[in-house]
Image (cartoon, grey):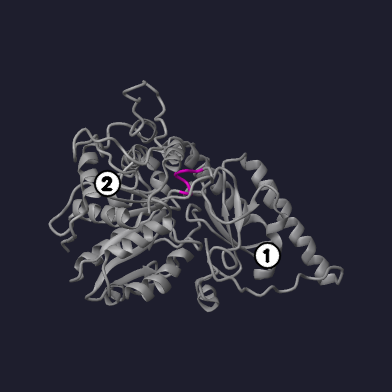
């Protein structure tokens, strides 16, 4: 479809034009080289190798309307521009990047751009915050209707049948949060192109990051990230981003869509602070180094979990035993394929590193899963993911508590443990899990012999997610 927009105001429009020439990638350079150099050019005034933090809210004009690309910091800021150039350099196929004050602000702005009474087709196992926004905020305030479909297993006809005349967007996560379902993105893209409404394809690439996956190369129209997670990587920034392709097509005007998103962002002020942009750009420079270790650690941890008697089921698409392992392998970005070529065959004998997220179920169900988490010492019981430190959580009670219990049960979220595997020494992480799981088995044995009283059920009254 052709995307039409309302004229942007002076701030957003002039700013978009003034920075457009900066948003260029250097495909001849490697991933880490681009991460370190694009957007981090030495300061022309002082020669500072690291970009300074620009805290000014307003900028001098030489004459009315004549300025150096910046007027007011809500509309544009040097640190935000620098981070956006870095993101364009990292996301293969990208030509535009817009950073927001959070991943949720990114979601809200994109859905707002669809206009009233639109229809969104979403993968059924979606981040709890996205589910909440679609079913509560977008429905109640914008008249947006959402249909949730199992895009991993649905037949072509079922997907096409779910696309309506007013379907403007298909929302994909792959792997999904938290059950790590895999979506064949090129297949969904091809189906969407057949539909008369020709909806845009959005992929939330937070779990894999631009290192492990390149959805724009697979046909996606928009890629979003919670920069809070892997791209920043240090659990000290809340931020989101939308990234769009470099080349428009007859029915896809990405320049206009970018301008529309910038206009909406400027109008409602969902902008990140200069300091947060500076921190996120600093974090992005080590993304490849961190993601390699996240992936290798998660692969090793998933392999260990499959062998422990207290574990009932492990979900990690990198394992060769995963039913969609072949899809996981073919979905990897070009630079990850190069990374795999450097690994010894002994490392790849039973699978591949595929991001840092692992989900699993312990024997004994939700009660045992809840009892397990406080026993961990190196895996911190906390929400979020993607930091250098390892985290563990119970999605049904934490990040996905806003999803109705019956739907959580149907999706397989109840009783599921989600791990964000950090970059600590993997032997220490495995030992931490082994000790906690062994302790859980000891408690179970005690319960069976009548020596230990099992923990009482705790009612789930949580309504929000983070």
Q: Position of residue 376 (x, y in %)?
A: 70, 53
Left of 321 or right of it: where is 9? left
Q: Closer to the camera, 270 or 367?
A: 270
Looking at the image, the residue that sits furthest to the right is 451
Question: What number of labels is visible?
Answer: 2
Left of 352 or right of it: where is 162? left
Q: Residue 32 appears in which quarter of the rendering?
A: top left
Left of 259 or right of it: where is 243? right
Picture residue at 69% right of the left edge, 61% below the top: 310
- Does residue 76 sit above or below 363 in this rendering? above
Provide the residue designation for mark 1: 370
Provide the residue designation for mark 2: 96
Picture residue at 41% right of the left edge, 51% below the top: 101
Q: Position of residue 312 (x, y in %)?
A: 63, 64
> In the drawing, what numbered circle is on residue 245?
none
Is residue 82 found inside the magenta-colored segment of the image? no
Magenta span dominant secondary structure: loop
Is residue 230 found inside the magenta-colored segment of the image? yes
Q: Position of residue 6 (x, y in %)?
A: 19, 60
Q: Position of residue 168 (x, y in %)?
A: 25, 68
- Does residue 162 sit above or below 51 in this rendering? below
Tell me the CA gap for discs 1 and 2: 42 Å
Q: Which residues are magenta?
A: 228-233
> Can see residue 279?
yes
Looking at the image, the residue that sits furthest to the left is 250
> Can see residue 184?
no
């Amino acid at each position: 479809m052709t995307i039409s927009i309302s004229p942007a105001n002076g701030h957003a429009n002039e700013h978009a034009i003034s920075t457009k020439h900066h948003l260029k990638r250097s495909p001849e350079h490697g991933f880490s080289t681009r991460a370190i150099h694009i957007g981090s050019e030495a300061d022309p005034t002082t020669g500072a190798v690291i970009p300074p933090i620009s805290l000014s809210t307003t900028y001098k004009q030489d004459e009315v309307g004549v300025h150096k690309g910046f007027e007011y910091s809500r509309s544009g800021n040097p640190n935000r521009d620098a981070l956006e150039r870095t993101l364009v350099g990292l996301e293969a196929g990208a030509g535009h990047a817009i950073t927001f004050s959070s991943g949720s602000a990114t979601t809200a702005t994109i859905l707002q751009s669809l206009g009233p009474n639109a229809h969104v087709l979403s993968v059924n196992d979606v981040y709890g915050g996205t589910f909440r926004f679609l079913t509560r905020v977008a429905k109640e305030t914008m008249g947006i209707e959402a249909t949730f479909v199992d895009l991993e297993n649905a037949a072509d006809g079922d997907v096409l049948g779910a696309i309506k005349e007013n379907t403007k967007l298909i929302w994909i996560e792959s792997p999904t949060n938290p059950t790590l379902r895999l979506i064949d993105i090129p297949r969904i893209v091809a189906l969407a192109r057949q539909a008369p409404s020709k909806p845009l394809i959005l992929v939330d690439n937070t779990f894999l990051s631009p290192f492990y996956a390149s959805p724009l190369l697979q046909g996606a129209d928009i890629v979003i990230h919670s920069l809070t997670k892997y791209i920043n990587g240090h659990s000290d920034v809340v931020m989101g981003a939308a990234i769009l392709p470099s080349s428009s097509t007859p029915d896809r005007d990405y320049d206009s869509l970018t301008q529309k998103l910038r206009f909406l962002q400027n109008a409602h002020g969902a902008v990140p602070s200069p300091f947060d942009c500076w921190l996120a750009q600093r974090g992005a420079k080590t993304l490849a180094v961190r993601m390699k270790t996240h992936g290798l650690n998660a692969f090793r941890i998933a392999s260990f979990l499959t062998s422990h008697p207290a574990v009932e089921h492990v979900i990690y698409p990198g394992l060769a035993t995963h039913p969609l392992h072949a899809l996981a392998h073919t979905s990897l970005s070009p630079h990850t394929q190069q990374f795999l070529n450097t690994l010894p065959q002994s490392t790849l004998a039973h699978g591949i590193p595929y991001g840092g997220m692992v989900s699993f179920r312990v024997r004994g169900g939700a009660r045992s899963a809840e009892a397990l988490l406080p026993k961990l010492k190196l895996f911190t019981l906390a929400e979020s993911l993607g930091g250098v430190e390892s985290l563990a959580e119970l999605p049904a009670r934490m990040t996905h508590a806003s999803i109705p219990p019956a739907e959580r049960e149907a999706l397989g979220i109840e009783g599921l443990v989600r791990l964000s595997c950090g970059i600590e020494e993997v032997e220490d992480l495995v030992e931490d899990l082994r000790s906690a799981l062994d302790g859980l088995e000891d408690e179970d044995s005690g319960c069976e012999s009548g020596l230990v009283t099992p923990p009482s059920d705790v009612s789930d009254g949580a309504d929000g997610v983070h």
